[in-house]
Image: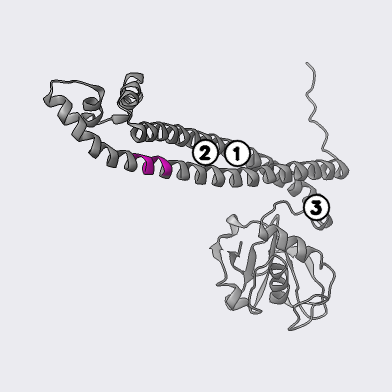
Amino acid sequence: MPVAHADPEPSTKELRSKALKLADELEKLTEQYNGMKVKLAQSQRAAKVAADNAERQEKSLRSVREKVSTLAANSYMQGGTDPTVSFVASQNPQSVLDQAATLNYFAKQDSTKVLALMQAMQAAERSRKSAESRATQVKQLRSQLDAQRKKVGETYEKVRGKLVKRDPTQLAKLPVVGTGKAAQALRAAMSKIGRPYVWGAAGPSSFDCSGLTMWAYKQVGINLPHYTGSQWNAGTHVSRSQLQPGDLVFFYSDLHHMGMYVGDDKMLHAPRTGDVVRIAPMAGRPFAGGVRVA
């Protein structure tokens, strides 16, 4: 009976190559997702404009119907059962308006304004339905992209975790995925790895812990106070399991130290006097909580 052999573990080089490819794919999917969000907003605005237009046309038509009702009443008194009566009496005038006989009747009566309004209302209704259909399609595509993006993201995190476990120095070399402001701020902060800790400094060449996060977020247009206690209240609080790259992480009951979450339970921070900006494990310090600024 043949003995089954487990597949050999990928080398560090192979893991890094796979991680970089996944990161690139994730960036592309994220941009496509962001593009779909923009298109969805545009489609929803178009649907609203079309709906508002249809409503305006309906209101205009109702005002004209009041005038036409006189004609209908006279026709009825004379024993007529023309389409005008059907139009005025119907609870669903659109169904009557869609009939060619009605259009022909009003045309023969030279009711130019009514005819134009009927046609405009029909066009507005078609436009509304088309816009709503487009918005629904874009929403479905966005959901599909989001599911695909999350799947690739989970795979990337697993590969990155294996790589970092084997070689912790790789964490600083891998790209920060994402196009949101938190990811952009983290990328900015990562560019300062190796810069010295200086008490009260907030860049660009030296930092203390809250000065580093303040400087990083300032690069993406978000102003944070130069104080850990204030930054603690600068966003939405998240648990350790919910942390995403770029989130602020705080330590100790008095919040006297903080950093930026990088991933794999590690953070980027400016540790202390005599040290430099670097990536370090979060373990070893009492975790107080996380804050999502963007």
At horizontal 28% and vertical 30% (from top left) the residue drawn is: 92
What stretch of residues is rendered in magenta? 53-58
Q: Secondary structure at mark 1?
A: helix
* Secondary structure, magenta segment, majority class: helix
Q: Label 2, on which residue? A: 135
- 3D distance between C-alphas at marks 3 and 2: 37 Å
Asked if the residue under mark 2 is in contact with the one under mark 3, i.e. CB atoms within 8 Å, the reply is no
Query: For mark 1, what is the residue?
Result: 147
At x 81%, y 50%, the residue is 166
Question: Crowdedness of circle 2 by 10 Å Cα count: few (<14), some, many (20+)?
Answer: many
Indicate the colouring scheme.
one colour
Cα gap from disc 2 to disc 1, whole angstroms: 18 Å
- Foreground tag (3 vs 2): 2
Query: Closer to the camera, 190 or 61?
Result: 61
Q: Amino acid at mark 2?
A: Ala
Q: Name the foreground residue: 210 vs 41.
A: 41
Residue sitting farthest toward the top: 1
Instruction: Residue type at mark 1: give it.
Output: Ala
Q: Quadrant of the N terminus?
A: top right
Is 174 drawn above or below residue 82 in the view shown? below
